[in-house]
Image (spheres, coloured by chain):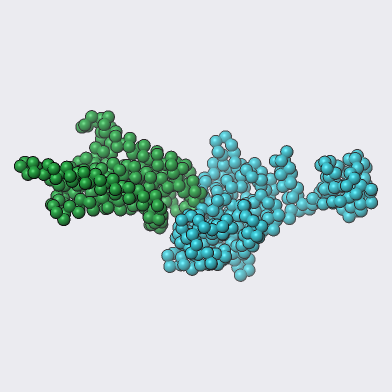
Chain colours: A cyan, B green
Amino acid sequence: MTAGELNSHRLTRYGGRSMSILIEVQDITRRYGDRCAVEGLTFRLEAGEVLGLLGVNGAGKSTTLNMLAGCLPPSAGTLRIAGHDMARAPVAARAALGYLPEVPPLYSEMRVEGYLRYAARLRRVPAAACASAVERAMTLCGLVDAGGRLIAHLSKGYRQRVGIAQAIVHEPAVVILDEPTAGLDPVQIREIRALISQLGEHCSVILSSHILPEVQSLCDRVLILHRGRALFQGPPQGSPKSGASVEVAFDRPPAATALEGEEGVAQVESLGDGRFRLVPIGDQPLPDLLGRLARQPWGLREFSPLEDDLEQVFLEIVAGEAA
Amino acid sequence: MTGVIASRELGHLLRSPLAWLLLGVLQLLLAWLFLLQLEGFVTVQSRLATLDAAPGLTDLVAAPLMGSAATLFLLVAPMLGMGALAGERQGGTLPLLLASPLTPAQIVLGKYLGLFAFLLLATALTLLMPLALLAGGRLDGGKLAAATLGLTLASAAFAAIALWVSSLADTPLTAALGGFGLLLLLWLLGLGGGTNGGVLHWLSLQSHLTPFLQGVVRLSDLVYYPALTAAALLLAIHRLKDL
């Protein structure tokens, strides 16, 4: 099925207006007492898209996803899932989504298959179709051998898979995953990432993460959240900016003023420990600058262009938080 | 959908050691009280035989047993109901229900029916004790039915109140303590309002049960328990909407 066919399939399945937009968030705000966890957030998710919410802890990612999933009403603003307003038609809106919260909502005394059957029934999968829906979700999530196991006895990676399986068992149009790889070991992270890319072929996915490379490898689009506000929305590779900065490191660092005297360097910021951030002049070709710096007796050991604005925005946030 | 939630809730109780332990302790206590009542009855039986319209086995053994069961249910209902919503909140499983295409009413009713079904099981087990007397004595079927109806209606209200408190609490322990405190307060309210009349007396859980135990089925009592049940459930639904 091509992307176009997939979209038209969803169009017929969910009907109504502007159906290629599955999530439409309009100016939502959530306050906890005086504190504003999310403020004036607006974005859209289109059919077949994988959107990543990127931000440090406490940026408002979980609050946003909680509101999207209908578990937390926004203090202001509107949310539409597959064309249904979450405040006015919550049941129809929730029927179109699957949600994995930060902590997978698992009943430890149940067995995997029984739990997934229960989840399917809650999502209005007809009783007759339950067995096949559960089987499909278990196959997709690599749980076929674990069906009879007690959830309490599962490893963290398996619990996360069961959490994802319950979110997709009713084949929702949108899957919402809150930090799906948090707390897993590297092998499990690779498996869950592979699973998420696979999900992206069947439905739209919105996931949150505080790991930039993860979002870059999984998502079609990124939204950077910071203190409840959107700082950046765009493609995960960002877009090269003219005059983007370069980070350099030297074994025998010169004085900052000496670097400023270099041809083609507009601005120098010392980062300590022999590292500097340089802003080249205009559209200075970077290889020329690299060549000149390497010829100096300073022992150039690193030269990394911070070319895209996404990375820069995120690194600035992280640096700001650390300071 | 309500049925799906109710059957899981009941299944969850039937799988939990706590519920079985509660049921076992309940049976043990009630059996002890039952034997005490029965012994008392046997002691006074010869004197009763000389009286006109003397109280019988049902009045002296079965009805008091149902009354004791109601008192114990005051404690049992909050302990069974504590996990219903507060437990899900603490365990992080509430989003499974909240993010599903369900209305708050379906969630609350499902939880409620599962809990009430378990209390019905406890009621049925309690009823078996007086029924065992049929082997050697005669029971007043009407009076026993009235007492059982009273216990059933009261436990329906207990379950609803326990569920409402569970919807307010963050942890099962506070839900259990809060639910028990509230039920006991409602039970004892009647002590403050004089024996007859008075608003407090009318509001009391206990004063509406006593007539049932005497074999009297009054409309006001028949309305009181379901009204209380509905009010508690509506409050719980409202709480879930407001989350």
Q: Residue at 89% across / 44% down in the picture? A: A253
Is residue B57 in view from this perspective?
yes
Q: Position of residue A139 (x, y in %)?
A: 55, 67
Above or below, B169 against A146 in this view is above
Q: Position of residue A249 (x, y in %)?
A: 85, 47
- Point out the residue furthest to the bottom here: A1
**Foreground: A73 or A109?**
A109
Above or below, B157 against A117 in this view is above
Q: Residue at 59% across / 39% down in the picture? A: A36
Q: Residue at 48% across / 54% down in the picture? A: A107
Q: Position of residue B208 (x, y in %)?
A: 24, 40
- In-image side of B218 versus A97 (left or right): left
Q: How many marks?
A: 0
Is residue A123 in view from this perspective?
no
Q: Position of residue A135 (x, y in %)?
A: 51, 67
Quadrant that contains the N terminus of chain A: bottom right
Quadrant that contains the C terminus of chain A: top right
**Foreground: A175 or B158?**
B158
- In-image side of B89 versus A57 (left or right): left
